[in-house]
Every structure is written in structure tokens, then in C-alpha cells.
Amino acid sequence: MLMKNISTNQAPAAIGPYSQAIRVGNLVFVSGQLPIDPQTGIMPDDVEHQTRMSLSNARAILQAAGTDLSHVVKTTVFLASMDDFAAMNGIYAEFFAQPYPARSAVAVKTLPKGAKVEIECIAEVVD
């Protein structure tokens, strides 16, 4: 299958040897999105704003791929602390409607740039 690189300046640029997203067939695999504002390069301090920024970045990449959050089938949420789960979950619920995507949420020792949250997703593209 042919892989297509997806990128947009409406989300933070990849800072390593990876793509913002890859499309394979009718699926888009969005790399983990840190909560960095693509215009300013600044990361919010609290987990609520970080969650909102991570999901906004994912949304921008999905739009560049020709899809949107309503077509997300799976997310993975990485948290620096499970103590932030409820706060993250409250913001996360603002971005998705039923049927909600399948989701995993895991605590990790640390995230790049000291982030409190990072979110990746897989979405369907309906041509």
C-alpha cells in the first residue's frame, strides 16, 4: 500500500525523524501531539489547556488529511501523571461525540519538553 505523508503548519512541526501523520489507504495515523501552540511555540501550563492544545493540533492534522475528529476510531492518551486523568477526560469529552473512539490512557514516566499530556489518534478518511 502507498503511504502518504500528511503535514500542516497549523500544528507543530515534527522535531525528529517522524511525520505529523501518515495516510495508508483510508486510514490516517496521527503521531503523538504535544500541547505546543504552532503559532507561538508555547506550551500551556495546566493539563486542561494542554489537552485542548494537543487535540486542536490533532484536529488540524486530520483536516490536512481530509478528515476530522468525528472520524477518529482510536486514540491513545499519554499522561505524565494519572492524577491528571479526570481533568484531561473533561476536556477530551468536549472534542468527541458518541460513538466515542476507542481509547487507551496510560501514565508514562516523562513526556517530551516536560508536557503533561500527549495524544495520538487513528482516523478514517471518507473520500
Image: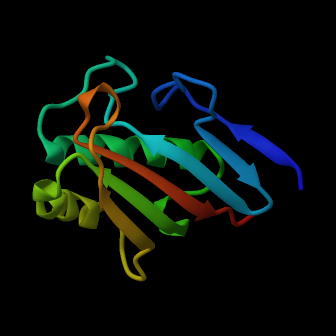
Residue 100 in the image: x percent, y percent?
Answer: 40, 77
Residue in the image at 52% along x and 24% along y: 13
Q: Which colour scheme is used?
A: rainbow
Residue 60 in the image: x percent, y percent?
Answer: 49, 42
117 is higher (above) or lower (below) than 85: above
1 is higher (above) or lower (below) than 35: below
Residue in the image at 18% along x and 31% along y: 44
Please, which residue is most extreme toward the top here? 40
Specify whether 74 is left or right of 89: right
> In what quadrant of the picture does the C terminus appear?
bottom right
Specify whether 39 is left or right of 117: right
Q: How many marks?
A: 0
Residue 114 in the image: x percent, y percent?
Answer: 24, 29
Q: Quadrant of residue 17?
A: top right
Q: Nearer the viewer, residue 36 or 67?
A: 36
64 is higher (above) or lower (below) than 103: above
Residue 106 in the image: x percent, y percent?
Answer: 32, 60
Q: Nearer the viewer, residue 3 or 114?
A: 114
Residue in the image at 18% along x and 42% along y: 49
Please, which residue is most extreme toward the right here? 1
> In what quadrant of the picture does the N terminus appear?
bottom right
Q: In which quarter of the image is residue 104?
A: bottom left
Please, which residue is most extreme toward the front here? 109
15 is higher (above) or lower (below) than 67: above
Specify whether 24 is left or right of 47: right
